[in-house]
Image (spheres, helix red, strand yellow):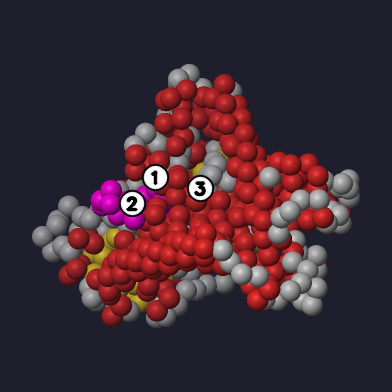
Amino acid sequence: MIRYFRLKRKDDATIEHIVVSLLLATYCMVFSNELIGGMGGLPMWLGMMLAYYLTRQFAMDKSDITHQLAITRKTEIKYYLKGYSLCFLVGWGIMKILVVISRMIGWGNLNGMSAKEYIDSIYGSTLFERWIYFIVWIVIAGFALSLFPLVFEKNKKRWIAYIVVDSVIFAALCKVIIAICNWILPQKKRRMHLKNLLDYLLLFHMPRRLFAILIIGSMLVVLGAIAFFVYKLSYVLYSPKKGVIVKNPAEFRTLSLTEKRDNLRGKLKLAVAVVLSVVIIGAGAYKLLSVIDNNRRQGELNYSQVAECLTKDSNFGPMVYNKEVYVPIDKELSFDTHKENTLGYIAYKGQDCNNKIYKLTIGNLLYKSSPNDKENEGLLQMSGADYNAFEKVSKVQKEGEWRNDRIYVLWDEDWVNETSYGVDKTGYITCEAGFVQSLYNKFGDVKYNPNDFKDYDTYFTIRGYKDMKSVNGTEIICGDWVGCILAKDNNFYYGSYKNQITGLELKELLNILGGSANPTENTKDSKDGIK
């Protein structure tokens, strides 16, 4: 193979080839980050850059190497596939090592952990967590391998169409796996910010080692199937046009006994591989269908919608049930362990809960407390793809826990999507304790009307926290409900259209929205809480 590439390389790379390689590598990096997770990033970028750039440069050379070496087109494709895979593995591996080392010796290791401790903190300290990272790497490798035919495709429209179709297939695959994880995830004791395949798999519990090995084996079989498919497709793209080669070369030569024996062995190996693949995939499909059927029989599909989130912020924003407004609170509930506590489906804002897709993938159900549970009387729990606990806003306002907090935050309605572009939470602005107190002094406890949330232009949630760690941490902490701000027709309202914000409060609000205040200063100014 090395001799082949030494003889093959002739032409210098063009500017167009360099630009296309950069764009393809960047696209693969973004795609893997958004849908697959932490095994992509810069390693994915460098791996794809090297694999596509070098392999395409060799493939586009106009010299016919078969005139110098006694090899066939199929052998050439095998060389290209091996070279493509090797370039990706080397590029991905080198960059992954550099990224880990740079974090280990830089700001990413402020606690001074050893190399083993730091790697365990990134890739898990248990065998189960490392299995998950290996599964995600298989998905990453499968996506990179599936793009191999682009090396030989010369038509620009087909080149772009192939990327689109391939991306849609892998995106659908990731969404299906995420939906399965949502379906059979155990009750989440902590509400984490989940945004890609890796996040969901890390919360997924594999009950047996054999089950994990079965999944990994199935994915390796699928990876092999992808390699076989791209090999065949690339051969079609790279081979000479019909009429130039002999269609049935076997008619012009007689195979020796050794060749016949080798052909028979090859066919037997292929048959065994196909049978094993069918058995493994069939076993996995049977297990999946059993889980789906078991959940279906629990009767969840027969419930109707009883509640709805009033804003797009389903984590911190209010929801309405039985014409009463409820707000999220920080409390772990287990009402969903008793089927008789089920009230019905709770929808995101503007969502239809009556279609089967919602019931099979999201299926957020609302639960009430048991009759004999006096401690949690009046509380509600959302459980399904998401988890949350709710309490009537009137009771929360009466308790006034926010007065004991030190940090006050305005959360954008779309803070979850804004956070998805980075590791740390974004989409929030800290504000002064005096501003929160002035709003309360002016408007007091708000009487919320669900109809006010139907036609607002912008929405903000105001919540209080004990410290900034509760705001910035990985875990989603609700904090204490203070109130909310609605914007409509260039006017601002505190929780209700009857409470228009004017005067000094409006001026301070505009200053806050114009730029984030310093969290340290806020802590100093409100360190004793609001009395």
Q: Amino acid at mark 1?
A: Trp
Which residue matches tag 2? 212
Which residue matches tag 1? 131
Relative to residue 425, is residue 260 depicted above or below? below
Q: Is the magenta region chiefly helix, strand or loop?
A: helix
Q: Amino acid at mark 3?
A: Trp
Provide the residue span drawn in magenta: 200-214
Residue occupying image coordinates x 23% and y 56%:
334
Q: Work out how far the residue at label 3 is from the one at label 1, CA to CA, in angstroms.
A: 10 Å
> Left or right: 475 with respect to 518?
left
Is residue 461 found inside the magenta-colored segment of the image? no
Give the numbered dot on residue 137: 3
- At mark 3, the secondary structure is helix
Q: Position of residue 140 (x, y in %)?
A: 55, 51
Residue occupying image coordinates x 44% and y 50%:
135
**Disc 1 residue crowd, few under 14, some 14–19, many 20+, Cα 10 Å:** some
Residue occupying image coordinates x 14% and y 56%:
374
Asked whether residue 397 is in view, the answer is no
**Contact, mark 2 vs mark 1 (Cβ under 8 Å):** yes
Q: Work out how far the residue at label 3 is from the one at label 2, CA to CA, in angstroms.
A: 15 Å
